[in-house]
Image (cartoon, helix red, strand yellow):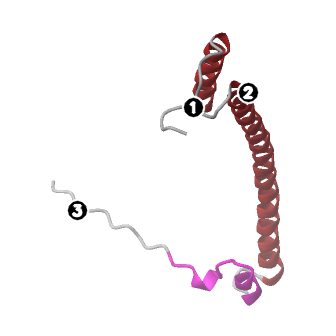
Amino acid sequence: MPRGKTIEKLLAEAEQIARVWADNPSFSLGDITLAQFQAKIAELRNTRGQAETLRTQLTALVNEAHARGDELSELVSRARSGFRAFYGPDSTQYEQAGGTRASDRKRPARKLKPLTPQ
């Protein structure tokens, strides 16, 4: 498809050509007949319809995948919190579950205030 042309615009132009061609039966386009030209228009419409149907289905599946991912993320967080509660915040099990052990956490450093001239 040429750059800058939407399928809608291309179909509109092709239908315009088909109407003019139907009004002028003596027109010829090499070995292409009016019926073949109209069949190409119908094929493009059908393919576009299938693509829109698939796009709709894809959107639904992506939304469903995101929802299931959110559910699983919540369960992972709950499980990690469970390991922390059951084995303790400095346990090997908590670290194996993806948590950061309390002893491995960086201690907060005091921020020094800059000296202000008086």
Q: Residue at x 63, y 17 (%)?
A: 21
**Label 1, on which residue?**
6
Percent across and percent down for residue 48 are 72, 36
**Label 3, on which residue?**
115
State how far apart marks 2 and 3 are (Cα).
87 Å
**Label 2, on which residue?**
35
- Circle 2: element type: helix
Q: Quadrant of the N terminus?
A: top right
Look at the picture and state if 22 lies above or below 104. Answer: above
Mark 2 or mark 3: whose residue is earlier in sequence: 2
Q: Are marks 1 and 2 in contact (CB under 8 Å)?
A: no
Residue type of the residue flagged with mark 2 = Ala
Q: Residue at x 71, y 27 (%)?
A: 38
Q: Magenta region: which residues? A: 92-107
- Circle 3: element type: loop
Classed neighbour count for the residue bearing mark 2: other residues with Cα under 10 Å, few (<14), some (14–19), many (≥20)? few
Looking at the picture, tell me which residue is in the foreground, 38 or 52.
38
Percent across and percent down for residue 95 are 70, 83
Percent across and percent down for residue 63 are 77, 48
Q: Residue at x 41, y 70 (%)?
A: 110
Percent across and percent down for residue 58 are 76, 47
